[in-house]
Image (cartoon, rainbow, N blue to C red):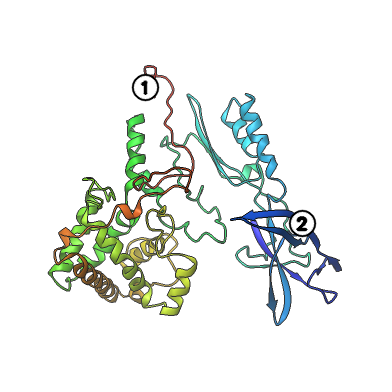
Amino acid sequence: QIDTYVETLCGGSSHKYLYKGKCRPMQFFDAGKLTNQGATSEVTFYRTVHGPVIGYARVRGRRVALTEKRASYGKDVLDQLFYHDLAHGQIHTARQFFRAANQTPQTFNSFYMDDQNIGVFTSGLIPIRPANVNPDLPIDGRGHEEWRGYVSFANHPQGLNPPNGEIVNWNNRPEAGYQAPSSNWMLGAIQRVDLLINNLGRGSGLTPAGVVSAMNTAATQDVREMLVEPLLSKVLHGGRAPNRRDAQMLSLLDAWRRGGGSRLDRTGNGQITAPGAAIMDTAWPLLANAWASAVLGPALRTQLASFESIYNQPPGGQYTGWHVWMNKDLRSILGMRVRGPFAVRYCGAGSLKRCRKLLWGALDRAGNQLASQQGPDPANWHASATAEEIEFIPGLLTYKMRYTNRPTGIQQVLSFGGHAPGDS
């Protein structure tokens, strides 16, 4: 929904810009006073036809202004049209629900259910850009590369009564080929939603309790362990471990995955029960850097980590991280069938033998760190569970809760018929 436009300055001023052949003044906007931690300041900015000026840069040595154009800018109140229809009983079918959801300019996944149907609709004002425009790059603001309207209702991602009876969403791509914002690099071959899909199984015979169980299991699993460790294990088991301790570390990682990859403290002693968690947490940065090292030098890896963290570690949501790319690349290195393979093979620059050596070396260095901190036996290594407890905004709630990979909204299980009152 958001593009950055480059405004060509004119008239010898930083507050005039060229648009459709005319030198125009920017609009000065005073948003009023803002008080933050006791300090009060006036919030002002300039804006062009595209939106607020967010900064200045240079193109071939010439100063330009950068503006941010957002499709929903000034239209946020239109959300209420959707909620009005819901609140006033104007929606009786899934198709009516889709039409109502399409009124909001915001990008939301909205879900529908009645006693016979389930459906999902992804709303939002999605711009149609000229063919020569790359939305991942700044756009010329002189008036020749403007949006050509918005994606039609029929072309929004939507679905009704899928054959397997499931609609599963956890901030994943709503449909194949649907483009992510240019700031989101994480809609790749795997995502944390795969945990939910795997825990739900084929969907047959599911009960409300079964759905809750799948949700709770996914909320405490380690995404790397369940979605990348099987490939990591396959690469490493193809060669000899540097020593007996490293072989035991891999064995503990394998056992943790077979046991479900839970990050729970099952004994209440403040430590994650499975020793595999300590191994994965310590090894992951080393493994990720080793994976990329044959192709990306230290400077590039540092730059990559600056805008896409190596892992969104708990108490974060495990949503972002290099695991998304590693999964696909390791499958390519192993000779597995890969849809849309990368143009470059990263681990070991495409050599399975070199890849294995790099990854074993990373695991060995992690073992050295843990041994110096917690003793020589990997079975006695544990990660802190208290360190990833969820804290609330000071003054809102005084207590903490143990880690769960939670959503920002409400989780609920609903059922229609077939149950005694109160069962659902």
Residue 156 horizontal/vertical position (percent)? 60, 45
Residue 134 horizontal/vertical position (percent)? 63, 65
Residue at the (36%, 40%) spot, across then down: 215
Residue 389 horizontal/vertical position (percent)? 35, 50
Badge 2 marks a residue whose secondary structure is: strand
The amino acid type of the residue labelled 2 equals Asp
Mark 1 packing: few (<14 Cα in 10 Å), some, or many (20+)?
few
Q: Do the residues labelled 1 and 2 touch (CB within 8 Å)?
A: no
Residue at the (62%, 24%) spot, across then down: 89
* Residue at image mark 2: 30
The amino acid type of the residue labelled 1 equals Asp
The image quarter in which residue 245 lies: bottom left
Sooner in the amino-acid sequence: mark 1 or mark 2: 2
Is residue 371 shown to the viewer in this render? yes
Quadrant location, the C terminus: top left
Is residue 297 shown to the viewer in this render? no
The image quarter in which residue 211 lies: top left
Badge number at residue 423: 1
